[in-house]
Image (cartoon, rainbow, N blue to C red):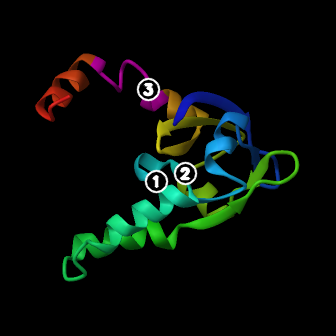
Amino acid sequence: MLLGEYSHNLDTKGRVSVPSKFREDLGQTFIVTKGLDNCLFAYSKQEWQTFEEKLKTLPMTNVNARNFVRFFFAGATECEVDKQGRINIPQNLREYAGLTKELCIIGVATRVEIWDKAKWEGYTSPDNMDVEELANQMSNLGI
């Protein structure tokens, strides 16, 4: 299971170190794609295959389903971990997520999310996220 929050720097060539605990679960090669909330999602090949199977069940006749599938597949790329434990994040994905130098890499159970540090801090700030209200909303979903 992918858990935790780590800070890493993006180098001038677009490379970032993947936390060693995440490399164990993600594997030597894994999929990075555009994620929701303007971050990137990273999936092990096995998790990507599971996600892909779910996306394949969406009806092609539904415009929202087509757009959702396009969003994830068009932005997807396979990344390979180098000998220093880094991956190269393609320019289009760096631009999409607004990645600058400082990044937060977080584990979210079955995927990793890669955030620009300033965006992550803004997203998780008390001004932006009311945890009590969030908990109330989750109770409506049975959690």
Nearest to the observer: residue 136 or residue 9? 136
Disc 1 residue type (three-letter): Gly
Q: Which mark is residue 35?
A: 1
Q: Quadrant of the C terminus?
A: top left
Nearest to the observer: residue 126 or residue 33? 33
First of labels 2, 1 by sequence position: 1
Residue 27 makes an appearance in the image: yes
**24 lies left or right of 128:** right
Percent of width and height locating residue 138? 20, 30
Q: Which region shows up in magenta?
A: 122-131
Q: Secondary structure at mark 3?
A: loop
**CA gap, disc 2 to disc 1?**
8 Å
Q: How crowded is the residue under tag 1: few (<14 C-alpha within 10 Å), some, or many (20+)?
A: many
Q: Is residue 58 above or below residue 79?
A: below
Q: Residue at x 37, y 71 (%)?
A: 69
Q: Secondary structure at mark 1?
A: loop
First of labels 1, 3 by sequence position: 1
Q: Secondary structure at mark 2?
A: helix
Q: Are marks 2 and 1 in contact (CB under 8 Å)?
A: yes
Nearest to the observer: residue 8 or residue 42? 42
Percent of width and height locating residue 41? 51, 51
Quarter of image, res 53: bottom left
Q: Dot 3 corresponds to which residue?
A: 124
Disc 2 residue type (three-letter): Ala
Q: Residue at x 17, y 23 (%)?
A: 136
Q: Is residue 107 on the magenta stretch?
A: no
Q: Dot 2 corresponds to which residue?
A: 97
Q: Residue at x 51, y 37 (%)?
A: 1
Q: Is residue 128 on the magenta stretch?
A: yes
Disc nearest the viewer among 2 and 1: 1
